């Protein structure tokens, strides 16, 4: 149980008198599950950030240790300590590194949201995974439905003041099913009174539910980041973890799992993840025995392994009912499979991908989460900037992916599909981003372009590019002074441009229209050749414009007439 319940007595660490005093302190504490303005552990007087409540002998004091799973990640040491130390080396194992697919998706989505809403927090999803592992074993091995809601409640002990803080019911039993006292709830173990202000809607269904992995992971992320702590610093990281559960052992354990998951993880099907077996309150009177556990009695002497006093073997657990995802055999394209997914750079794709989940018999499967993933060398995304989108199928078994947004990189890329938490044959889509294009070019001025031999043109050539009537911005263009309307080769005489060194240039490449679709060419100059010349401008997409240039000597008739000589007077 996490930051959200009153802090539990460290078992075996206090006398009866100390325990009584500690219980009183628990009731009044400002732990994340308690009420109050601070919404977290209290800092020491004068401190700007909370500090660990650790006694001089190094043990956690009487306010520490809420129940949580204590199983360690695989260690390099042949004799791992039951209480890990900070920085304990860890190695990656195939089983322990697996995180149920939907829960892993929830951690990563929470990180992505916080990267935008609280960028200074620098929260890694692996921290949420470490806490989720310690608190609930990733929702008890990923026992969640298509929307991420746990299959059955995950509850902490009743907060009735008997060894834990006294927190009377605050949610009328809505989340924990207890209308007398509060209990920590869900994959990240929030108590209802904390959820009232910390809860978030992480899966976009319009409600915040602590029993939902997406909602709980996002709420936990905001909770950890609430005091402007920076997870990229040791001080910020430690303060945030201790605010979740004020225990040095808890801090060490979460840090070990954090380091472990940073070394590598992979997703496993929902419901197949390993569930930790050891809790910090094992062996105490508050340890809750499952109602289905058979009575455990010792056999009488002389009856080893048999006799009426030998307990019956624990009955096997009934198989879990199949989830909708379990019934999916394959995915099919639900749209027009022959439709080409194409868009120009910077544009949204007009077509959207729709995929149908089907049983082996071809029946539709609703309420299944389909993950769409963009792959390949591309900067294309789904609308909103993400490269992964998870959508639940409707009653017809169809999941409609968000609209695709093309980036600036041209070329083909793929969108792959998969059922979250269940490995089946998916369907892949190919999309293509083409270069920005224009279909029309026009001068922005109708002023004739004229020049005298050896001079320079007074006006610069400016054109506007459009595509289907809309502004065509960032479109590549080329300008060439050509020999004639029928001969588009570069002219060797007449008007010209100058390069950076002042040399004659009659072809300009790597031109591009601006955000208004405008292209203004450099100044034009004329050599000593007179006549009419042509400038041809072309763009990606086939738009072409030919501009006429005239070089002629100054018109003598246009010169002012000389004044008549004054007549002589007689």
Image (cartoon, rainbow, N blue to C red):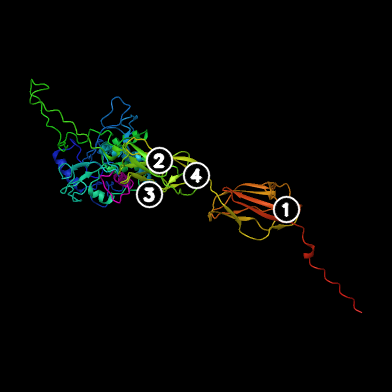
Q: Is 507 inside the magenta-drawn segment?
A: no
Mark linked to residue 526: 1
Residue 213 spot, x, y in % from top left: 29, 43
User: In 3D space, how far apart are the residues under numbered discs 1 and 4 (Cα atoms)?
Assistant: 41 Å
Element class at badge 2: strand
Q: Is residue 404 above or below residue 445?
A: above
Residue 108 spot, x, y in % from top left: 36, 41
Of residues 539 and 278, the one nearer the viewer is 539
Residue at left offset 46%, top offset 38%: 376
User: In 3D space, how far apart are the residues under numbered discs 2 and 1 (Cα atoms)?
Assistant: 56 Å
Q: Earlier in the sequence, mark 2 or mark 4?
A: 2
Q: Are marks 2 and 3 in contact (CB under 8 Å)?
A: no
- Residues in magenta? 202-225
Q: Earlier in the sequence, mark 2 or mark 1?
A: 2
Of residues 327 and 176, the one nearer the viewer is 327
Q: Which residue is mark 2?
A: 373
Which of discs 2 and 3 lies nearer the camera? The answer is 2
Mark linked to residue 117: 3
The answer to whether residue 519 is seen in the rendering is yes
Q: Earlier in the sequence, mark 3 or mark 4?
A: 3
How packed is label 1: few (under 14 Cα within 10 Å), some, or many (20 or more)? many
User: In 3D space, how far apart are the residues under numbered discs 2 and 4 (Cα atoms)?
Assistant: 17 Å
Of residues 447 and 140, the one nearer the viewer is 447
Q: Earlier in the sequence, mark 1 or mark 4?
A: 4
User: In 3D space, how far apart are the residues under numbered discs 1 and 3 (Cα atoms)?
Assistant: 58 Å
């Amino acid at each position: 149980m996490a930051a959200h319940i009153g802090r539990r007595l460290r078992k075996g660490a206090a006398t009866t008198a100390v325990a009584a005093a500690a219980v009183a302190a628990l009731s009044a504490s400002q732990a994340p599950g308690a009420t109050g303005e601070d919404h977290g552990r209290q800092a020491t007087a004068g401190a700007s950030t909370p500090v660990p409540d650790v006694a001089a002998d190094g043990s956690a004091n009487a306010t520490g240790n809420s129940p949580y799973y204590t199983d360690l990640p695989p260690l390099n040491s042949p004799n791992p300590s039951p209480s890990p130390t900070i920085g304990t080396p860890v190695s990656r194992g195939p089983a322990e590194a697996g995180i149920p697919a939907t829960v892993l998706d929830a951690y990563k989505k929470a990180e992505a949201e916080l990267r935008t809403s609280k960028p200074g927090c620098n929260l890694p999803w692996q921290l949420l995974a470490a806490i989720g592992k310690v608190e609930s074993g990733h929702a008890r091995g990923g026992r969640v439905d298509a929307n991420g809601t746990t299959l059955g409640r995950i509850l902490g002990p009743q907060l009735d003041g008997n060894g834990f803080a006294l927190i009377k019911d605050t949610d009328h039993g809505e989340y924990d099913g207890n209308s007398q006292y509060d209990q920590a709830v869900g994959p990240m173990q929030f108590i209802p009174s904390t959820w009232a202000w910390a809860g978030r809607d992480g899966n976009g269904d319009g409600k915040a539910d602590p029993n939902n992995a997406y909602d709980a992971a996002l709420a936990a992320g905001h909770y950890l980041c609430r005091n402007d702590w920076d997870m990229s610093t040791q001080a910020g990281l430690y303060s945030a973890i201790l605010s979740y559960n004020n225990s040095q052992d808890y801090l060490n354990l979460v840090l070990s799992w954090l380091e472990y998951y940073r070394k590598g993880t992979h997703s496993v099907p929902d419901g197949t993840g390993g569930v930790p077996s050891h809790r910090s309150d094992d062996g105490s009177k508050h340890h809750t025995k499952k109602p289905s556990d058979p009575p455990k009695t010792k056999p009488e002497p002389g009856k080893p392994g048999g006799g009426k006093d030998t307990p019956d073997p624990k009955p096997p657990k009934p198989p879990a009912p199949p989830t909708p995802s379990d019934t999916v055999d394959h995915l099919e394209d639900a749209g027009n499979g022959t439709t080409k997914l194409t868009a120009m750079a910077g544009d949204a794709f007009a077509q959207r991908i729709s995929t149908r989940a089907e049983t082996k018999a071809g029946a539709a499967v609703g309420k299944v989460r389909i993950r769409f993933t963009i792959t390949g060398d591309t900067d294309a995304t789904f609308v909103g900037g993400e490269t992964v989108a998870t959508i639940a199928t409707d009653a017809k078994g169809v999941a409609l992916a968000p609209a695709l947004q093309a980036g600036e990189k041209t070329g083909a890329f793929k969108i792959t599909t998969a059922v979250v938490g269940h490995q089946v044959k998916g369907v892949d889509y190919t999309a293509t981003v083409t270069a920005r294009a224009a279909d029309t070019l026009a001068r922005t001025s109708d002023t004739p372009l004229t020049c005298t031999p050896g001079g320079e043109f007074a006006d610069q050539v400016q054109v506007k590019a459009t595509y289907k009537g809309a502004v065509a911005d960032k479109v590549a263009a080329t300008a060439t002074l050509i020999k004639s309307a029928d001969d588009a080769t570069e002219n060797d005489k007449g008007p010209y441009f100058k390069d950076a060194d002042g040399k004659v240039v009659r072809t300009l490449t790597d031109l591009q229209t601006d955000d208004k679709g405008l292209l203004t060419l450099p100044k034009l100059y004329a050599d000593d050749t007179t006549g009419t010349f042509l400038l041809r401008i072309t763009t990606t997409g086939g738009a072409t414009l030919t501009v006429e240039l005239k070089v002629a000597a100054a018109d003598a008739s246009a010169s002012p007439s000389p004044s008549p000589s004054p007549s002589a007077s007689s």
